[in-house]
Image (cartoon, rainbow, N blue to C red):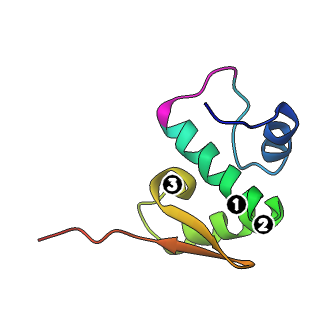
Amino acid sequence: MLAVTERQLRQWERHDLIKSSQTFSLMDLIALRTLQKLHIDRIHPARIKLAVQALRDRLSGVDDPLRELRVIADGRRIRVEIKRKST
């Protein structure tokens, strides 16, 4: 499904980006896909961790930005796209 190595999973675990698990839910796979894309775009896990923490601090109601928001690389920067609720 996702071509993520065990080594990469362990690195993300060490940076507290994912929790250690033998199985993954659909939401976990969304987070893993996001991390994989950021990795391909050469964003270091420490920078991802800082961005995730900043999002948690600034956006009330967002507990897990990698699962709940669209987080993408924009060059060497991390960008977040938030869908607006239609009224």
Q: Quadrant of the N terminus?
A: top right
Residue at the disc numbered 3: 63
Could you say which disc has been placed on residue 43 in the image?
2
The residue type indicated by label 3 comes to Asp
Classify residue 42 as left or right of residue 75: right
Name the image quarter holding residue 54. Answer: bottom right
Q: Position of residue 21 (x, y in %)?
A: 69, 26
Secondary element at image label 3: loop
Is disc 2 in contact with disc 3, using a CB cutoff of under 8 Å?
Answer: no
Disc 3/disc 1 C-alpha distance (Å): 19 Å
Q: Position of residue 23 (x, y in %)?
A: 63, 21
Mark 2 vs 1, N-terminal side: 1
Q: Position of residue 28 (x, y in %)?
A: 56, 37
Disc 2/disc 1 C-alpha distance (Å): 5 Å
Residue at the disc numbered 1: 38
* Magenta segment: 22-26
Is disc 2 in contact with disc 1, using a CB cutoff of under 8 Å?
Answer: yes
The residue type indicated by label 2 comes to Ile
Secondary element at image label 1: helix
